[in-house]
Amino acid sequence: MKKRFYTLIILFTILGIVQAENGYDLWLRYKKIDNKILLQSYQNKNGNILFPAVSESMNAAKKELTLGLEGLLGLELKETSNVENNTLIVGTVESSNIISKLSFADEIIFLDKDGYIIRSATYQGKAITVIAAKTDIGVIYGVFHYLRLMQTHQSLDKIAIKEEPKLQYRVLNHWDNLNGTIERGYAGYSLWDWERLPMYKDPRLIDYARANASVGINGAILNNVNANAKSLRTEWLVKASGLATAFRPYGIRVYLTARFSAPKELGGLPTADPANPRVRQWWKDKVAEIYSLIPDFGGFILKANSEGQPGPQDYGRTHADGANMIGEALEPYGGVVFWRAFVYHNERHIDRVTNGYNEFKPLDGKFNKNVFVQPKNGPIDFQPREPFHPLFGQMPNTPLAIEFQITQENLGHSGHLVYLGALFEETLQSDTYANGKGSTISNVLQNYKKTHGISGIAGVSNIGTDINWTGHLFGQANWHAFGRLAWNPDLSSKKMSEEWVRMTFSNDVDVIKPIQKMMLMSREAVVNYEMPLGLNHIMNYDTHNGPEPWHDDPVWTAYDYHKITKDSIGVNRTKNGSDAVGQYHEPLCNKFNNLETCPETLLLWFHRLSWNYKLSSGKTLWNGIVDHYYEGVDQVRQMQVIWNSLEKRIDQERFEHIKALMKIQESEAVWWRDACLLFFQSYSGMPIPAEYEQPKYSLEYYKRIPFPYDWDNTLFFNKK
């Protein structure tokens, strides 16, 4: 038996078979470095460690450093009390007598509370490396950065790194329900085991906190924005306190979604009117109870007077009235309010794109200092491509927190490889021209810290109970990208994608380049096969997965989003239409308004055009739409070819996982392409060029299938 075992080991070594992985470790894979020169260099730098740790956070940082050094370098943490050459010293000015004596000690003291320094230095003639911070949480961030340098094979010689977050509140918004489900199943099932909290804390919660801290995320909103009032009941607050305890050592504060009508539903009051003294007192008492259980509670997010949710407008009050009532209750404890600007009217004569601006712009300057107004990145609803929300740059007297969606609600859910770093970057680097050229959304968000004392960003989480956390392994890259951009909104998607590939798969350039190529083309691919040239909101009404440009009922119709007729398609949002262009600063207003200057990527968002309109390519609008849909499918197929070429370079388990999902993505890209083009063709009457592969099924077939379970073997639909 023993001989057989060793034979297998030798055989695996000869064949070069890569050890299987399931993706659980995310980008925190501390696999031993196989570059001998680098390995020796790193080992020399970490031969002796001086790391006094007395707090929970310091112990967490020390545990992480131990885990990293053991995995990456094969070193046990060798602590010393004496400074020798190549000693790594970790701590704060308060925790380390040596750090307090360094020449840059004052620089450490004046860091942001989350900031840190990693620096090569000398102490008593000895060469040392220092990871130092103002606070224990800063030390955690510094340790993760230090390990990341080794994970990505960067030099540790002559390091001079100073990092401070550019945004203060960096929050994940979990759309988790109290029954364990997640909104529409975007991210599987909830990590929060409410039934066993607070007594039992799944060890996975610690790994969740580690992963967030490693990219700088410092907050978690625990429950769905479509809130259930009972999340504020005492028994549920006790459960939430268990999560707060698990996350606290890693600097992550918990937040809750509050239901505006909670004083009626839980408190038995006849009203939730923010002008009512009893209502205001109810919120103050509830907030006091929360802080007695969770001393570092972060605050609330509210979805109010949107999609049927209760709010202050039910009582003739404004969004500011409602937000300020809750902000005042939180203010003595340092809590904040994220008041969502996602509001619209289900009225056919009103362009939904304009609602958020029209409701919130007049309220600029009327919100409490601890209240964020939180618009989504675009004015519709997390579409594959939208122009940025016009409120950015238009509310100088109110701090805004941008809301991105990490989960892929309208981008194939967790079945499609869509790297959202490109979408995040596109939005953050969009110029609002609020104060002239260079007023990017990134700069606008960062400036709120100077002008209002707070700055923030939120991302709707894609994390669930899948063993790899995000369902699709590449969904991890979107979690990673959001966190890195929350810390520094000016990072590039290209840089972040390379970092993630190095930490998740390999530092081999022959692996990095092809995977990075897939990632960087994937967002444009989904735009092409779903909603090109500014088309939007034509997904399935119920599931938000798959096409349904034909949806039409008295409550909601896709026709308001494409305005299709036999002559034309697109929505007129110019000065002669709904004037959505007028909500942007110049020169954007005229740029979007003018057909000659409007980017073709947003053409049908702002303009209604005939099928024969000539694009910059010289092709008609119809042929341009057709080309984009086919290009999207071709791009997915290119991604498949690239991935399949990596079979011997990626461990089999993760390789097969992605390969299978890529097959699903191809079939669903074809589904989008054929269903949309057949629908558009039924109006345009124009042909799909013969050189393209023709749709396999009829439009009626696509209209009847809610989801393409198994197209080739289905017994449920007539394939006419």
Image (cartoon, rainbow, N blue to C red):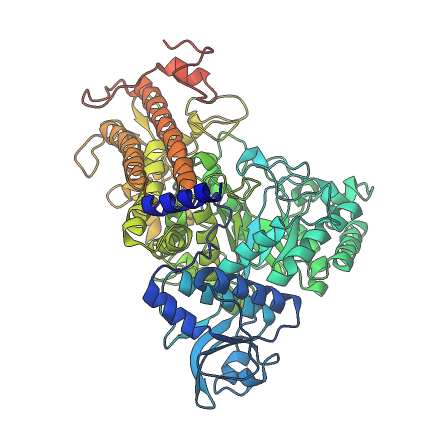
- Looking at the image, residue 35 sits to the left or right of residue 299; the answer is left
Which residue shows up at 65% across the image and 44% down it?
A: 192
Nearest the camera: 34 or 706?
A: 34
The residue lying furthest to the left in this view is: 618
Residue 414 in the image: above or below residue 318: above
Write down the quadrant of residue 324 in the picture: bottom right
Residue 167 in the image: above or below residue 714: below
Q: Does any portion of residue 534 appear in the rendered image?
A: no
Nearest the camera: 542 or 75?
A: 75
- Looking at the image, residue 543 sits to the left or right of residue 238; the answer is left
| Residue 95 horizontal/vertical position (percent) | 61, 79
Write down the quadrant of residue 641 in the picture: top left
| Residue 90 horizontal/vertical position (percent) | 53, 75
Q: Quadrant of the C terminus?
A: top left
Residue 450 in the image: above or below residue 367: below
The residue lying furthest to the bottom in this view is: 124
Residue 121 in the image: above or below residue 73: below
Label count reads 0
Which residue shows up at 44% across the image and 11% down it?
A: 717
Q: Does any portion of residue 101 appear in the rendered image?
A: yes
Which residue shows up at 62% across the image and 72% down it?
A: 53
Nearest the camera: 86 or 386?
A: 86
| Residue 329 horizontal/vertical position (percent) | 73, 58
- Looking at the image, residue 132 sits to the left or right of residue 523; the answer is right
Which residue shows up at 40% across the image and 32% down it?
A: 660
Nearest the camera: 625 or 113?
A: 113
| Residue 373 horizontal/vertical position (percent) | 56, 53
